[in-house]
Image (tube, rainbow, N blue to C red):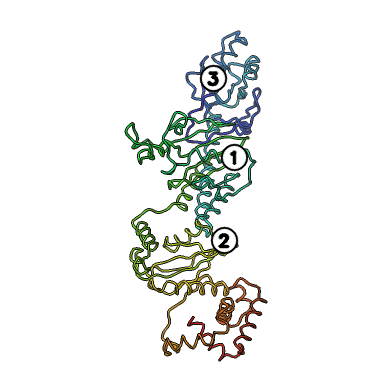
């Protein structure tokens, strides 16, 4: 059957039309297949309706064209032409021409597998057409509502601390299947939804290769044994299904004089790659979307059925994932690259800082509220929320360099510690400030804590050299144990709270007690004495 020229409204299942009690329609021949859908209704009394059909119609006829004494041969030819034109079903009106549906017509429809619907005398063909359009309008409204709700849920998911897994989870739920993000090398980076069988997983991974754009280093000189991917409009076969691919545009920069591996060759290869491809394997609908960042990321979906609006919903997810995984190429990006090169070649941080766009910066340490460790994409999302692309993932903590002039506010789903503004030479100290602020924020369950500037304090009246010497002498018994120093500092900053110190250090409260007892023994000091605590806090602030 040829593909029908589908109108912008969604099709209606034939069963939905038959369920309308006001019409009184009755299927009397043909398959009772719930998958049969109707795209429109058309009335014709032509003996050969083939030239007037586009495909997908419910053809309505009162049998005016049927000659007297018509036998099985006439009805066989009539039904075969409807099937050849792609008609979805035949509705035969009883009265005024025929009192009943001809038996030979029933037999012909049964033989050719064409659903035959009896239209009772009280139902006009215009009423059938009107009911069909009403059902189409209802289906269109439901589709728009579903797409709108999906867009909102996907946008909300993209704003979460773990945007990529959240978007994939929402997409899988909306499609009722599986959603997978593949990396530039074909690695499965993240997935959500029920895991399909091995056959479907393998087919989806292969389908992703159809749309993945090649990197310049992967280009090869084409040969008869190594042809390019199919271009726009072509169908590429894959076993056991068929892959349908759509191309994003025209070829550019290619020709007989363009050398293999040149930019023109790359552009031609990119243009030849389709932006999306689909397949059906083991009854599961597979679709792959190349993300628009050109980095080689691919979104793959596997759903047991295809519903109206699925393509639009998946396209929205692909756009969001493109933004989340894409690298921003700009003048500032070139400056960051230049700064990195200079640092690697031995330049001091103070020399390369102007290339980053500012003289003073704040260090922000962030940790997601959930148990999952942040991945690079999640870290980039935090950087985007803070307005900076200078992001580093250090275990369970994300570090971000933020220009001093940019306000650092709370980010939902994250606990943040913020340093004081610092010049490049003081960035290591600012990093320590941010780490301590984050530890206190987690211990006090505050979403954000800053290492704020304060007025001149009593400690500022002591000459720095003398203060440093006093601190080293006081802490000498424990200076060889960083764990003891860090535990004492955190415990004092949290006013001697065992539980909050344990949370801040990610250790058991008994471990905190043991370490503090060890500090008291080595320092030979009563840590319950506020004067002793003040002296130790003064010393710890100098280290």
Relative depth, front residue between 286 and 524: 524
Precedes in sequence: disc 2 or disc 1: 1
* Among the two numbered marks 2 and 3 on one chain, the one whose residue lies closer to the N terminus: 3
Write down the quadrant of residue 342 in the picture.
Answer: bottom left
Residue tagged 2: 373
- Nearer to us of marks 3 and 1 is 1
Of residues 422 and 484, the one nearer the viewer is 484
- Residue drawn at the location 63% of the way across and 33% of the way down: 19
For disc 3, the marked residue is 84
Single out the mark in the foreground, 2 or 3.
Answer: 2
Whole-percent x and y of residue 498?
63, 79
Task: Give the residue furthest to the top.
Answer: 69
Mark 2: few/some/many CA within 10 Å (<14, 14-19, 20+): some
The residue identified by callout 1 is 202
Q: Which mark is residue 413?
A: none
The secondary element bearing badge 2 is classed as: loop
Disc 3/disc 1 C-alpha distance (Å): 36 Å
Distance, label 2 to label 1, CA atoms, is 28 Å
């Amino acid at each position: 059957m040829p593909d029908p020229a589908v109108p912008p409204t969604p099709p209606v299942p034939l069963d939905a039309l038959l369920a309308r009690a006001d019409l009184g329609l009755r299927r009397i021949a043909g398959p009772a297949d719930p998958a049969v859908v109707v795209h429109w209704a058309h009335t014709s009394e032509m003996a050969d309706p083939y030239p007037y059909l586009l495909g997908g119609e419910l053809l309505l006829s009162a049998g005016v064209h049927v000659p007297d004494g018509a036998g099985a041969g006439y009805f066989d030819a009539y039904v075969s032409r409807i099937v050849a034109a792609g008609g979805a079903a035949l509705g035969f009106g009883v009265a005024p021409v025929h009192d009943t549906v001809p038996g030979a017509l029933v037999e012909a429809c049964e033989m050719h597998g064409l659903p035959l619907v009896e239209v009772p005398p009280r139902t006009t063909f215009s009423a059938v057409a009107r009911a069909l359009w009403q059902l189409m309008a209802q289906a269109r409204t439901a589709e728009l509502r579903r797409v709108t709700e999906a867009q909102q849920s996907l946008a909300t998911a993209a704003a979460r601390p773990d945007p990529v897994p959240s978007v994939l989870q929402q997409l899988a739920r909306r499609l009722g299947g599986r959603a997978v993000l593949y990396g530039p090398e074909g690695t499965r980076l993240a997935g959500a939804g029920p895991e399909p069988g091995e056959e479907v997983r393998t087919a989806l991974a292969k389908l992703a290769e159809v749309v993945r754009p090649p990197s310049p280093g992967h280009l090869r000189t084409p040969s008869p044994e190594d042809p390019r991917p199919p271009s726009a409009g072509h169908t590429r076969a894959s076993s056991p299904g068929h892959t349908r691919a759509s191309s994003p545009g025209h070829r550019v920069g290619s020709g007989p004089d363009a050398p293999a591996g040149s930019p023109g060759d790359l552009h031609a290869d990119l243009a030849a790659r389709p932006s999306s491809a689909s397949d059906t394997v083991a009854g599961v609908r597979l679709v792959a979307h190349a993300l628009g960042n050109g980095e080689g990321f691919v979104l793959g979906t596997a759903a047991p059925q295809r519903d109206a609006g699925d393509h639009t919903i998946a396209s929205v997810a692909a756009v969001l994932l493109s933004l989340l995984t894409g690298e921003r190429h700009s003048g500032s990006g070139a400056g960051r690259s230049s700064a990195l090169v200079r640092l690697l070649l031995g330049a001091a941080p103070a020399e390369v800082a102007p290339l980053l766009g500012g003289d003073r910066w704040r260090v922000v340490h962030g940790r997601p509220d959930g148990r999952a460790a942040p991945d690079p994409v999640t870290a980039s999302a935090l950087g985007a929320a803070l307005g900076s692309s200078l992001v580093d993932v250090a275990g369970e903590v994300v570090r971000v360099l933020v220009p001093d002039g940019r306000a650092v506010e709370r980010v939902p789903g994250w606990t943040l510690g913020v340093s004081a503004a610092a010049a490049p030479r003081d960035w290591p100290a600012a990093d320590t400030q941010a780490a301590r602020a984050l530890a206190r924020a987690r211990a006090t369950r505050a979403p954000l804590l800053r290492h704020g500037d304060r007025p001149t304090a009593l400690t500022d009246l002591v000459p720095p050299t003398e203060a440093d010497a006093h601190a080293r002498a006081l802490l000498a018994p424990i200076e060889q144990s960083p764990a003891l120093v860090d535990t004492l500092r955190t415990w004092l900053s949290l006013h001697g709270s065992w539980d909050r110190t344990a949370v801040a250090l990610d250790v058991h409260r008994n471990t905190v007690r043991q370490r503090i007892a060890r500090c008291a023994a080595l320092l030979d000091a009563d840590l319950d004495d506020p004067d002793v605590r003040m002296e130790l806090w003064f010393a710890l602030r100098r280290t």
